[in-house]
Amino acid sequence: MTDDTPQGVDHGLRPIGVRSVLLVLLITILWSGNPVAVRYSVDTLPPVFVAAVRFTLATLLMYVWCCAEGSRLRLRPGQGVPCILAGIGMFLQIATFNVGVTMSSSSHATMLVNTYVFWVLIIEHLILRSAGWQVRKFVGVLLAAVGVVLVVTRSGDSGMAAESGDVPTLRGDLILLGSALILACKTLYVKSALRKIEPGKLVFWQNLVSVGLFFAWSGLTETVDASRVTSATVLAIAYQGIFVGGLCFAIQAVLLRHHAASQIAVFSFATPLCGVLLAVLLRGDPLTPWLFLAAACVAIGILLVNLRPPPPQLARQPSGD
């Protein structure tokens, strides 16, 4: 789950019931399956072309969503530049992610891209000076750093090469870390852009801009061999575009109308754990002790960073009787 999702209309803190928890877990599982789906796609198609097709589907679904919501997509003065910049950010982040996945494994990808949470915190604290540095958050970032070191230092492990076709490389993992950093920068920019433009409109136009860039870059640098496309390729791209790009957005938009963003974000710690599990089950990534430890470090780090103290209880007022 990323922070460029729609912001809630109702900012009142409502308790999260069983139904909301199940919905949050559903989008967590769907999102965690995205690296696996990308890995299946790039088995037979170029990575940037895969992104182009995926975001074409996502843009169409976003258009339907905005129409159903009655959102006006026409840009007002001053809204064009934020959409273009957000679209460029989307292009850079997804392109590097897909390219990184081709040189790595699904399990490494799901852990490394989710480090964007820590990049956001570091940028807010060290550069923007807009966030405090609590001990709990510092421990979370430190744990995540340990997880990243474990992941990167195990890249190209010979034991993994013997067991799995998806062999992670140091170059691929570093590209994925770069993608996470770009995602963090884009997330912070989108948060500021939402002051000028409605969430649904921003997502639609940034997707549309990125689609044009994806197709242009792919046309200039990649060769698409349609004869290599398999049913697994088609299903994987449909999953990315429909379930991740469409359904996850819709469910989270509904949840954010009833719950604070922090109440939902705290569940994101499960994303790397679910992603590793799906990579093991579907792609045959070996679940080594080092991989499990790295996933646990990243997950606990995300949990510590996203935890919020409970809101202070209002003092009980004496009755007038």
Image (cartoon, rainbow, N blue to C red):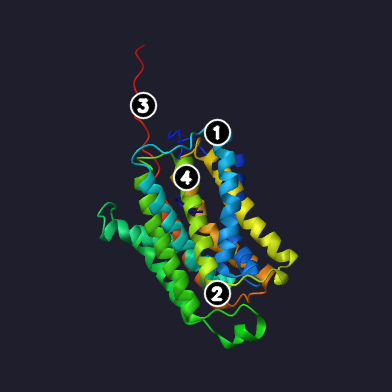
- Return the x and y of residue 316 as percentages of the image width and height: 36, 26
Whichever of labels 4 and 1 marks the residue nearer the N terminus, that label is 1
Task: Specify the quadrant of the image occupied by residue 317.
Answer: top left
In the rendered view, would you say 16 is above or below 316? below
Residue 17 visible to the viewer: no
Whichever of labels 2 and 4 marks the residue nearer the N terminus, that label is 4
The amino acid at mark 4 is Gln
Whichever of labels 1 and 3 marks the residue nearer the N terminus, that label is 1
Residues at marks 3 and 4, CA–CA distance in whole angstroms: 25 Å
- Residue placed under numbered mark 4 in the picture: 263
Q: Which mark is residue 189?
A: none
Residues at marks 1 and 3, CA–CA distance in whole angstroms: 40 Å
- Return the x and y of residue 159 as percentages of the image width and height: 61, 86
* CB atoms of marks 3 and 4 within 8 Å: no
Whichever of labels 3 and 2 marks the residue nearer the N terminus, that label is 2
Q: Residue furthest bottom?
A: 158
The amino acid at mark 2 is Leu
Figure disc tally: 4
User: Mark 1 or 3, which is nearer the eye?
Assistant: 1
The secondary structure type at the circle numbered 3 is loop
The amino acid at mark 3 is Arg
Q: Residue at x 51, y 37 (%)?
A: 15
Residue 47 visible to the viewer: yes
- Residue placed under numbered mark 1 in the picture: 69
CA neighbours of label 2 inside 10 A, class few (<14), some (14 to 19), many (20+): many
* CB atoms of marks 1 and 3 within 8 Å: no
- Residue placed under numbered mark 3 in the picture: 316
Q: Quadrant of the C terminus?
A: top left
User: Mark 3 or 4, which is nearer the eye?
Assistant: 4
In the rendered view, would you say 112 is above or below 160? above
